[in-house]
Amino acid sequence: MGKEAIVRRGYYLDLLDKNTNSFKKGAAKNIALLGSRKSGKTSIVKEHIKAVKDIIPVYIDLEKISLNPENFSIEFIGNVAYNFLKKPLSQYKKFLLLEQLLKIENELKSKSAFFLIQTV
């Protein structure tokens, strides 16, 4: 990777940092990282997620999530709940099933993510 790629990486990490700070103030915007396959988009996002300490970022791989609207909703909410509750990877799959999401309702009631389950 040349020097230009490193500069661009820094640019996008800075952009994500600025957007995170705006989010904390209630003024965040959606950001799309566009680029060809294997150009480093995912690694930039994951690097940013590791650096963020005072909010709970959620990474969802849209290539692996269902396009069916009903399943998409459950999988999206499941991913958010999984990340919010900081569960171990071994429990990830149960968060992709509506029945399991409804079972963790009590665990979420004490947290601000409870509304996620109610939207399904």
Image (cartoon, rainbow, N blue to C red):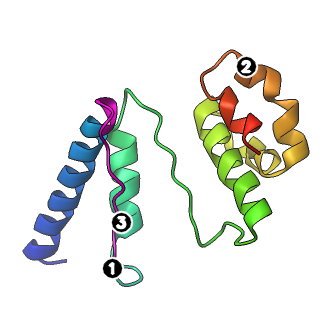
Please state, as top left, top right, bottom left or bottom right, where the C terminus lies in the image.
top right
Q: In which quarter of the image is residue 53?
A: top left
Helix, strand, or loop for circle 3? loop
Please state, as top left, top right, bottom left or bottom right, where the N terminus lies in the image.
bottom left
18 on left or right of 94: left
| Magenta region | 23-34
Helix, strand, or loop for circle 2? helix
Where is residue 101 shown, x and y percent of the image?
A: 81, 39
Q: Mark 3 points at which residue?
A: 32
Q: Residue furthest right?
A: 99
Sequence-wise first label, 3 or 2: 3
Identified by mark 1, the residue type is Gly
Helix, strand, or loop for circle 1? loop
Q: Mark 1 points at which residue?
A: 35
For the residues labelled 3 and 2, the Cα–Cα distance comes to 32 Å
Q: Residue furthest top?
A: 110
